[in-house]
Image (tube, grey):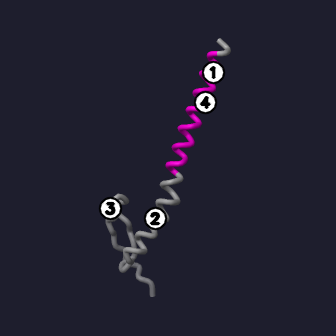
């Protein structure tokens, strides 16, 4: 039978993680790595892509302003 009791574990640089009682540190580390790879890197890459898109649009706007004024 699976335990339904949860405990809160504080992981440095991540925060609190709720896990079933008796969950090993290796399992927690694996879960944190999967979470980081799936969400945090996608968030960062989206931020970088957005910054480049804004810079490209700004460059196009500046060129249009310069040539069409």
From this view, report whether residue 57 is shown above or below residue 2.
Answer: above
- At 56% from the left edge and 37% from the top edge, which residue is drawn? 52
> Which of marks 2 and 1 precedes in the sequence?
2
* Quarter of the figure with residue 69: top right
Q: Earlier in the sequence, mark 1 or mark 4?
A: 4
Which of marks 4 and 2 precedes in the sequence? 2
Earlier in the chain: of badge 2 and badge 3, it is 3
Disc 3 secondary structure class: loop
Residue lying farthest to the bottom in this orientation: 1
Q: Is residue 49 magenta?
A: yes
Instruction: Please name the residue that numbered disc 4 is placed on.
Output: 57
Tell me where residue 28 sits by quadrant. bottom left
Mark 1 and mark 4: Cα distance apart in space: 10 Å
- The percent position of residue 12, horizontal first and vertical second, equals 32, 61
Q: Residue 12 carries which label?
A: 3
What is the number of the mark on residue 33?
2
Q: How far apart are marks 2 and 3 (CA)?
A: 13 Å
The residue under the point 50% across, 56% down is 39
Q: Residues within 10 Å of mark 3 (few under 14, many from 20)?
A: few
Q: Distance between the residues labelled 4 and 3?
A: 39 Å
């Amino acid at each position: 039978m699976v335990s339904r009791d949860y405990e809160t574990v504080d992981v440095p640089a991540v925060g609190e993680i709720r896990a079933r009682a008796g969950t090993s540190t290796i399992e927690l580390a694996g879960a944190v790595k999967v979470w980081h790879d799936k969400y945090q890197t996608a968030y960062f890459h989206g931020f970088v892509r957005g910054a480049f898109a804004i810079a490209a649009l700004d460059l196009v706007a500046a060129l249009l302003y310069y040539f069409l004024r």
